[in-house]
Image: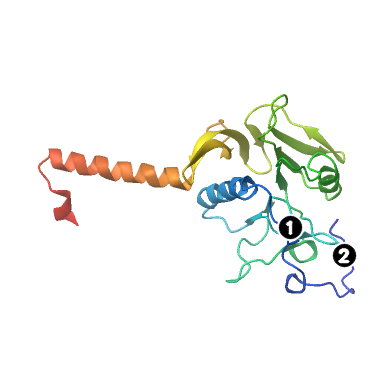
Amino acid sequence: MLKYNPLHCLPSAEDLPDSDDTPVDNELQDLIPGLLKAILAWVWASRMDWFFGVDMGVYYDPDLPAIVPDGFLSVGVERIVDEDLRLSYVFWEENVVPILALEVVSHKRRGEYSSKKKLYAELEILYYVVYNPHRRKKAPLEVYQLVNGEYVLLPGHPVWLPEVGLGIGRERGTYQGITREWLYWYNEQGVRLPTPEERATAAEERVQMLEEQLRSLGVDPESLK
């Protein structure tokens, strides 16, 4: 999908709209991929070879409008292109197809199980993740892997993604003060990776514990500041 004629004058990201101007019809479509991106920013803080886009236009053909996944992950690209960051993700500039696309299904479906799934397969995106919190009879989270041009549903929970080096799954938790089921990243042992909020809370608890230990030894923590 990345074979473009270098003699053609292809538009750059600055020349293209950065979204399709279609508003999300469910707040979760922003919050869920936003949480996954926030966790990655901690886990891969020292890495500069990845990018996670949220509700960003992805251009794969100069003659067609962008697609806008709720979230997508690319590995092997510059994390930060410049201080103004990316306007959109353009295949013929990045030269890397996203490794994962995420869609969060709202009450109003937008082709997540049909047209989008077909297009992502044609674009050779290795993993397609669909999360439908309204499902009751089927699993809310489905993770597909591209095999011989077709998406195959992967079993288990969390689902390990070896090419990413992380697993993805769902469980109840609290994010931005909202307690509900969220999507999270997991390590190879199936342990959920903490969110930035959880890391901050744990750090505060360690500080408090240290202060209590100092007081038990007759040391005023304030005198050490």
> How many numbered marks appear?
2
Q: Residue at x 61, y 48 (%)?
A: 27
Residue at numbered disc 2: 4
Closer to the camera in the image, 128 or 7: 128
SS for tag 2?
Answer: loop
Quadrant placement of the N terminus = bottom right
Q: Is residue 91 left or right of residue 182?
A: right
Task: Name the residue type under label 1.
Answer: Thr
Task: Classify residue 166 by image quadrant.
Answer: top right
**Horizontal and vertical percent for residue 194?**
48, 41
**Horizontal and vertical percent for residue 123?**
83, 51
Q: Earlier in the sequence, mark 2 or mark 1?
A: 2
**Horizontal and vertical percent for residue 86?**
66, 66
Q: Above or below — where is 39 with respect to 85?
A: above
* Front label number (2 vs 1): 1
Q: Residue at x 58, y 46 (%)?
A: 36
Task: Name the residue type under label 2.
Answer: Tyr
Residue at numbered disc 1: 22
Q: Residue at x 86, y 48 (%)?
A: 122
Quadrant placement of the C terminus = bottom left
Q: Above or below — where is 104 with respect to 53?
A: above
Q: CA gap, disc 2 to disc 1?
A: 28 Å
Q: Say which mark, if any, is on residue 95.
A: none
